[in-house]
Structures are given as structure tokens and as C-alpha cells.
Image (tube, rainbow, N blue to C red):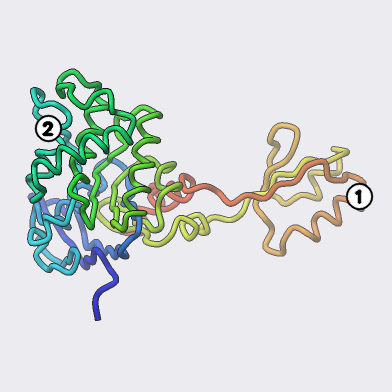
Amino acid sequence: MKSELAISATGLVKRFGDRRVVDGVDIAVPKGAIYGVLGPNGAGKTTTLRMLLGIIEPDEGKRSLLGYARPREASDHIGYLPEERGLYPAMKAREAIAFMGALRGLDWREGRKRAATMMEEAGLGHAVDERIRKLSKGMAQLVQLLGSVVHQPDLLVLDEPFSGLDPVNQERLEALIIAERTRGATILFSTHIMSHAERLCDGLAIIAGGKRRFEGTVAEARGMLPQQVHYVAQHDGLGLPALLPADAMREGSGWKFIMPDSGIEALLVKLIEAGHGIAGLSIERPGLHDAFVKIVGPAALESAR
């Protein structure tokens, strides 16, 4: 049976000297998914991606890319944007994209044709014949990204792709990632910016201290924290705090507290019967940022050792 995973890795370990930079990481990325590898700076994200791609070899563990046990054999089917950006400054943008495609087996003329179309769609049509040295940092980064997808890879691996981009170019990059997934590609990207992962990812792994601390969906990560209740009374009298849960705290004109284990209904009945009423009520699940802090915070790292 053909594997439904674009990437599979078990027990990846990488040592640099006496330090285990990656320490037993497992990752499973389904085909056609947008998958994020999240973690603080120095967590081991880049080293993990490089091992998956075969740029460096793991000291222990196994990995498979697009069904290949030797990742480099799949290189023509992969697009890669490394953390270290680099283009030839004297090259024109269109030629730079075509050149990157040619390195992956794409015909030069077809690459130039696709490059012009892709730059137009990305809002860079005016810069097709500009030399890289004349482009802004963000524009040059988008050109390099287009070069990594011009050959229409089955798998796109992006290392911190949003780093250094202004909000407009971040939106363009998000649109490009979604378009690549719609085309049928699998996208794996690393980031420490939670908002992009929250909007884009079908699944994610959180790495800290070289270990995988979590793997699952954004909803599953957020589900590790309790729901928060925001309550505003119609009549905020002296007896109100005694009726609220012990963790209730003032927030503006209202109160914020964790959803009681028994639910909210019984508490609301008490508040109404006591004459406080309900002027406002909202129930929220904490965001991915809060879940990330819980998973990789100092207490979590200490307990995982």
C-alpha cells in the first residue's frame, strides 16, 4: 500500500560535540498538508529540517521523504527555502527563478516563462527584469521563494520563511503557501511566529530543547488549556466576587476566570438570582501562543527532562 505520509521520521538524533541538538524527534507529515515545526530560537528546528532533507545525516534514527529512504534521491521533487537567504546579486529576478528551477531539472525557457507569470501573480510583475541587488530584502526573499516552487515540487520545505518580511509580503507568502497546497503540494515550514501557524497549519510539531514536546492539530494544542470566561455584570455589587470562582480577576469593567469544571450554567443562575444580571458574556479558548508557552515554558521543559 502506498504511504499516505510525505514525511516520516522516528528517533532523529543529532549531536554537535557533547550537545544533543536534536534528541529523539519523531515527525509524521501527511501528503497534501500544511505542517508547521514550531519552537523558540535554538530549539533544533533547522537541524531537524536539514536531517529530513538529507543535507546533514542523523546520528541516530530513520526518515523517509516522499517514499525515499535516502532523501537526496527525492531532491528534484522538493523545493527548499533555507534559513540563510542567498541569490546572485547581479542576476535579474526572472533569471534567478529560472536558474533555481534548472537546478531541479526544469527547462530554462519554461522556467523563465513560469517566473514571469509567478512574479505577476505575487505582485512583483514590475520587478521581473530588476537585478537582485536593486530589490528590497522582502522582495528578494519572495523571489527566492518563487525559485523554490517554480519546478512545481511535491514537497516544499521552508525554514523561517516569514522572518524579515513586512506585513504585506507576509500576506503574499501565506497566499502562496495556500496556493501550493491547493495545487497538491505538501508544505513543511518552521517558525517561531504563532499567528502564521495558527492560520495555516493542518498539523504541527512543537520542538524545544531538541525534543518534540507536542504533535497534533492547532485545536488540539489549544485544547490543552481551559476555556476562559469573560463576564460583565449588569449590577456589579459588593457581593459579586464571593459568587465568582476563586481565580476570578478584574479585567476592565468585567471579570475573567477559568471555565468551572461543572460548566457555566449553574453559575449564571446564581448571578441572576442574586440580582447581578448579565451585561456581557464570552467564552474563549486560549490561542496557540498561550498553548506554546505552556508546552515549552521553563516548567514544562524541567518536567520533561
Q: Which residue is mark 1?
A: 274
Indicate the quadrant containing the C terminus: top left, top right, bottom left or bottom right.
bottom left
Which mark is drawn over residue 95? 2
Q: Residue at 70% of width from left, 37% of height from top?
A: 250
Q: In this image, 224 relative to 126: left or right? A: right
Left or right, 2 with reference to 76 = right
Mark 2 or 1: in front is: 2
> Is the residue 90 above or below the residue 74 in the image?
above
Would you say residue 72 is visible in this rendering? yes
**Does residue 237 show up?**
no
Q: Quadrant of residue 4?
A: bottom left
Which residue does the image show at 16% across and 60% down from the upper left?
13
Q: Position of residue 34 (x, y in %)?
A: 35, 54
- Circle 2/circle 1 CB separation < 8 Å: no
Of 53 and 1, nearer the camera is 1
10 Å neighbourhood of mark 2: few (<14), some, or many (≥20)? many
What's the distance in space between the residues labelled 2 and 1, CA to CA?
Answer: 73 Å
Report which quarter residue 278 is drawn in. top right
Which kind of residue does numbered mark 2 sit on? Glu
Q: Looking at the rendering, in which quadrant would you find the N terminus?
A: bottom left
Label at residue 57: none
| Residue at figure coordinates x 45%, y 48% from the top left | 198
Q: Which residue is rendered at x = 86% and y = 43% of the image?
A: 239
